[in-house]
Image (spheres, rainbow, N blue to C red):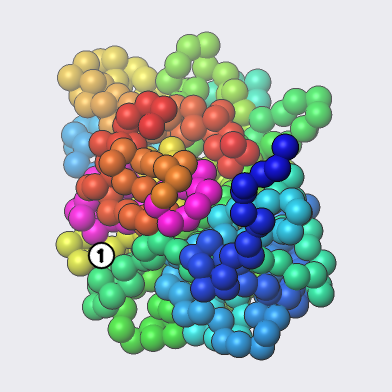
């Protein structure tokens, strides 16, 4: 088993995988397996959820709060390039080899998530290719949208 | 050699190209390169009535003239308000006009936002960068008659937090329970606790009744193109989406052709266009 995810255990009403929009109308087996592998965590404002370069062992579903995705350079040590919030997912590095985070993620406000064990959930996807394909087709539009957003950001449209 | 040319004649004040003198009453820095000017007619007359979305030609004598959208409260007959970004010698001279300076103004010109079509419907305003000033008069108008409209959703994006205009006023709007004002920036440092991402990334989180909504978009053309696409995907018909186009306007009276956009002149037929009218033109390169 992976080390436990960062963050404090939750003490409030438990979060449920099937109530997250990402899993809406996905195959019940995927939802059931994700729930089996999920750990609920909460983060205070400013807490780091993932760090650039760390092993990407968890798939995060955000239920409450707001998370900043940051990249670093010598000139800009903490440049926020995107924020994600309730109903969204945090990253896909857990799915793509070599499974290391490519950015920092920091809570901008008190944040509650479900952290799903990435390696075990990958094994579930591999064991059920049709359902795995369904899962990827749910994730792919999110990746495509973020890629398109990045391309537009690169145009620096407000500076034209 | 003797010339038969007539001596230069002053343009009569009634001529459509003759600017009227206005005095700068105040100048406020919104960002390091963007200023808001409040101007009043120097003869004490009332300000010509204008519709949200229309523009004036502002003339700094001896420097040049530029088209600038009206950005003040349309119900205020005592002054015109323009927010100007320093994007070149002429706009720099306008933006940096100090209080007391006389500036020539002619206008208003163009077709504004069809606010009448918003009555009884949800309204979505999407502004990018300096696209907020042309939409601010719409917001003034909507809020002045709040009961006439459904939900009011505003999405405003800028490059960084330092590039946000009307910052104090936005904070007040965000406190109002009867509108939802989302702000996002393309990038930020850790002093910013708001949203980061494109305005289009906020559209999925925007609440409106698709079949009974209108959307007004203003900002960089590529932003409007993607925002219109995403609003249409959320169910707002193309005929209920309106965009304010920007082109290099010179005469403002559809004579010179500088602002031609497809078969239209932005100064006369726009700057506000319905999305289904301009959709194909937006996809035409170098148009």
Residue B279 spot, x, y in % from top left: 27, 41
- Above or below B114: residue B43: below
Q: Quadrant of residue B214?
A: bottom left
Point 77% across, 32% down: residue: A76
10 Å crowding of disc 1: few (<14), some (14-19), many (20+) = many
Q: Nearer the viewer, residue B247 or A4?
A: B247
Name the one closer to the observer, B91 or B169. Answer: B91
Where is B239 relative to B45, above or below?
Answer: above
Q: Residue at x 51, y 67 (%)?
A: B15
Q: Is residue B108 magenta?
A: no
Q: Which residues are magenta?
A: B228-254
Residue A83: x and y in percent read 55, 44
Residue shown at the point (37%, 26%) measured from the top left: B285
Circle 1 is placed at which residue position? B213
Secondary structure under tag 1 reads strand
Q: Residue at x 62, y 54 (%)?
A: B6
Taking depth in this image into account, of B280 and B237 the one nearest to the observer is B280
Residue A16 in the image, given as x and y percentages of width and height: 35, 50
Which of the image's four quarters has the C terminus of chain B?
Answer: top left
Q: How many marks?
A: 1
Quadrant containing the N terminus of chain B is top right
């Amino acid at each position: 088993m992976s080390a436990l995810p960062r963050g404090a255990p939750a003490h409030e009403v438990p979060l449920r995988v099937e109530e997250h929009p990402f899993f809406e109308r996905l195959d019940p087996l995927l939802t059931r397996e994700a729930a089996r592998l999920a750990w609920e965590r909460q983060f205070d404002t400013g807490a780091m959820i993932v760090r650039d370069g760390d092993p990407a062992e968890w798939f995060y579903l955000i239920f409450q709060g707001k998370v900043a995705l940051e990249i670093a350079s010598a000139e800009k040590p903490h440049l926020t390039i995107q924020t994600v919030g309730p109903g969204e997912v945090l990253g896909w590095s857990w799915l793509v080899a070599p499974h290391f985070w490519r950015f920092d993620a920091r809570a901008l406000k008190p944040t509650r998530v479900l952290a799903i064990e990435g390696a075990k959930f990958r094994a579930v996807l591999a064991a059920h290719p049709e359902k795995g394909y369904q899962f990827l087709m749910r994730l792919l539009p999110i990746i495509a949208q973020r890629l398109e957003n990045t391309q537009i950001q690169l145009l620096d449209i407000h500076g034209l | 050699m003797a010339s038969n040319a007539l001596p230069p004649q002053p343009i009569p004040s009634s001529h459509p190209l003759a600017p009227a003198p206005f005095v700068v009453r105040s100048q406020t820095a919104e960002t390091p390169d963007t200023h808001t000017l409040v101007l009043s007619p120097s003869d004490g007359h009332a300000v010509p009535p204008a519709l949200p979305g229309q523009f004036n030609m502002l003339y700094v004598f001896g420097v040049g003239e530029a088209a600038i959208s009206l950005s003040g409260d349309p119900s205020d007959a005592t002054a015109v308000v323009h927010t100007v970004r320093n994007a070149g010698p002429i706009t720099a001279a306008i933006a940096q006009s100090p209080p007391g300076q006389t500036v020539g103004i002619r206008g208003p010109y163009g077709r504004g936002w069809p606010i009448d079509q918003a009555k009884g419907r949800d309204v979505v305003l999407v502004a990018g960068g300096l696209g907020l000033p042309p939409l601010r008069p719409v917001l003034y108008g909507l809020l002045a008659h709040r009961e006439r409209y459904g939900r009011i959703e505003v999405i405003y994006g800028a490059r960084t937090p330092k590039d946000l205009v009307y910052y104090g006023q936005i904070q007040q709007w965000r406190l109002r329970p009867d509108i939802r004002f989302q702000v996002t920036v393309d990038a930020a440092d850790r002093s910013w606790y708001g949203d980061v991402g494109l305005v289009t990334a906020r559209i999925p989180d925007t609440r409106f009744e698709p079949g009974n909504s209108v959307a007004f978009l203003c900002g960089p053309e590529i932003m409007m193109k993607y925002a219109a696409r995403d609003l249409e995907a959320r169910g707002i018909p193309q005929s209920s989406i309106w965009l304010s186009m920007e082109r290099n306007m010179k005469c403002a009276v559809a004579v010179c052709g500088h602002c031609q956009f497809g078969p239209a002149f932005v100064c006369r037929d726009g700057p506000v266009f319905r999305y289904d009218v301009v959709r194909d033109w937006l996809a035409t390169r170098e148009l």
